[in-house]
Image (cartoon, rainbow, N blue to C red):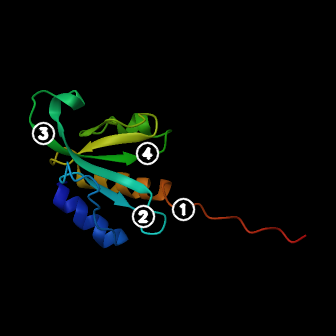
Amino acid sequence: MTRAALLQYVAEQYGVEPDHPWESDPTSAVLRHRDNKKWFALVMKIGRDRLGLSGHTPVDAMNVKCDPLMIGSMRMNTGVLPAYHMNKNHWLTVLLDGTADDETVKALVDMSYALTAPKKKAPKPDA
């Protein structure tokens, strides 16, 4: 999946447009929940060497939150790596250059969206 396809999916699925909070890095985009403004994805260009890949050419990638119990198995997918610059027990980096298949990217975005959603309050029991 490419950056453009990811952003289109997020817009259609969740009604979320990318936020570009850093003037010094206009290519990086944060995807946030509309209600609580919590991040569920960070899209950026990263040097391949910074991800442990060969070469120095920047690649589009995305950080997403992941269920800690699934981190290890998700990293076994092509194009899914330990998180860049985030807690590696809770976040993953996914390549957006076509390496990771579309269904894996969508599943990870959906999981991240759910994990960062506002917590529902349990109803108070009647006294």
Question: Which of the 4 image quadrants contains residue 59?
Answer: top left
Residue 6 quadrant: bottom left
- Is tag 3's residue or tag 4's residue first in the polypeptide sequence? 3
Whichever of callouts 4 and 1 sits on the residue coming sooner in the sequence is: 4
- How would you rate the neighbour count of disc 1 (Cα within 10 Å): few for under 14, some for 14-19, many for 20 or more? few
> Which residue is denoted by mark 1 in the rendering?
118
Residue ID for mark 3: 58
10 Å neighbourhood of mark 4: few (<14), some, or many (≥20)?
A: many
Q: Which class describes the residues within 10 Å of circle 3: few (<14), some (14-19), or many (20+)?
A: some
Q: CA distance from mark 2 to mark 1?
A: 9 Å
**With 65 as the anchor, is 123 left or right in this view?**
right
Marker disc for residue 13: none
What residue is pinned by disc 4?
A: 66
Contact between labelled residues 1 and 2, with CB atoms less than 8 Å apart: yes
Q: Residue at x 37, y 69 (%)?
A: 14
Query: Tag 2: residue type?
Result: His
Occupied quadrant, residue 38: bottom left
Q: Residues within 10 Å of mark 2 (few under 14, many from 20)?
A: many
**Residue at 24% over, 40% down:** 79
- Looking at the rendered structure, the secondary structure element under dot 4 is loop
Q: Of callouts 3 and 1, which one flags the residue occurring earlier in the amino acid sequence?
A: 3
Q: Amino acid at mark 1?
A: Pro
Expressed as whole percent of the image width and height from the top left, the position of residue 1 reads 19, 54
Q: Residue beneath label 2, please?
A: 33
Say which amino acid is labelled 3. Pro
Q: CA distance from mark 2 to mark 3?
A: 27 Å
